[in-house]
Image (cartoon, rainbow, N blue to C red):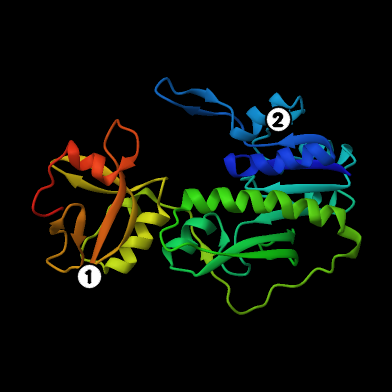
Amino acid sequence: MKVIFMGTPDFSVPVLDALAREHEILAVYCQPPRPAGRGKKDRPSAVQARAEALGLPVRHPRSLKEAGEQAAFAALGADVAVVVAYGLILPQTVLDAPVHGCLNIHASLLPRWRGAAPIHRAIMAGDAETGICIMQMEAGLDTGPVLLRETTPIGATETTGELHDRLSATGARLILDALANLPDLRPEPQPAEGVSYAAKIDKAEARIDWTRPAADLVRHINGLSPFPGAFTEIGGERVKLLRAAPARGQGTPGQVLEGFTIACGTGALEILQAQREGKKPMPAAEILRGMTLPPTLG
């Protein structure tokens, strides 16, 4: 099929690779390069870098609301557009331009976790499972009918980074199935019940409040790993806590019980992986070889 691909971050790259192997990519749309790094130089997105490596034409308009951009999109004559974590709203004119419209790969079991951060929110909420939905896009936010879905359990200490990679691979496989069987698929409207929204992660959420129950904080830490990374301050240094598991013990909130086991508002948790400022992530045991924890974490 003649495909327009629309995506921006790492999550989208395996999908682009899969489509490029089996279909004709007419153009790749992604977000414009953004300032990054210490020098704040413009850096292309992961999708742009991969598309250029594959020799595919790249477009990165700042908006698709202009008539000229919409006409250029329609002029490609695509059979279908595949959208995954693109980052721009698609006007109805764009949604209607391809023969088979625009298909979105969404990392949740719709209608649960519509919106920007479905993987983070599923882990942070303690969901037992999540998945991928291939959705026929319409004007509403992730409201379109679902063509295919696949469910997967969420591991007890699985991080957002790990689940992100698993779901990205699933999305790449599932979209190929959808395109291969598109004429036979029957869109299933999303139910009105069970709708929830995955708000964009705010960095203000990253500071750990040790008065919360241990079970909540385990999900919080794993859900914010690796980005933005839940943190606590140890001796004036901001330390990211990147993986946690429930642990036995109790004490005052923030009290260091043994090793890297910390008392919470209810129960306790054990830190399994952390990252000091300017260092790489490492197992908690290695962190403790170079850092003495105070009696209580703030």
Of residues 271 and 20, the one drawn nearer to the viewer in this rendering: 271
**Residue where numbered disc 1 is placed:** 267
Category of crowding for the residue at label 2, using alpha-carbon neighbours closer than 10 angstroms: few (below 14), some (14–19), many (at least 20): many
| Residue ID at (88%, 37%) | 75
Asked if residue 229 lies left or right of residue 83, the reply is left
**Dividing the picture into quarters, in which one does residue 174 lie?**
bottom right
- Name the N-terminal-most of marks 1 and 2: 2
| Residue ID at (58%, 29%) | 33
| Residue ID at (85%, 65%) | 185
* Above/below status of 217 relative to 39: below
Is there any visible trace of residue 68 in the rendered image? no
Residue 207: x percent and y percent? 28, 52
Q: Which mark is residue 51?
A: 2
Residue 17: x percent and y percent? 72, 38
* Above/below status of 90 relative to 193: above
Asked if residue 185 lies left or right of residue 136, the reply is right
Of residues 213 and 6, the one drawn nearer to the viewer in this rendering: 213
Is there any visible trace of residue 87 in the rendered image? yes
Tell me the kind of residue under disc 2: Ala
Farthest residue, direction bottom: 193
Tell me the kind of residue under disc 1: Gly
Residue 153: x percent and y percent? 54, 65
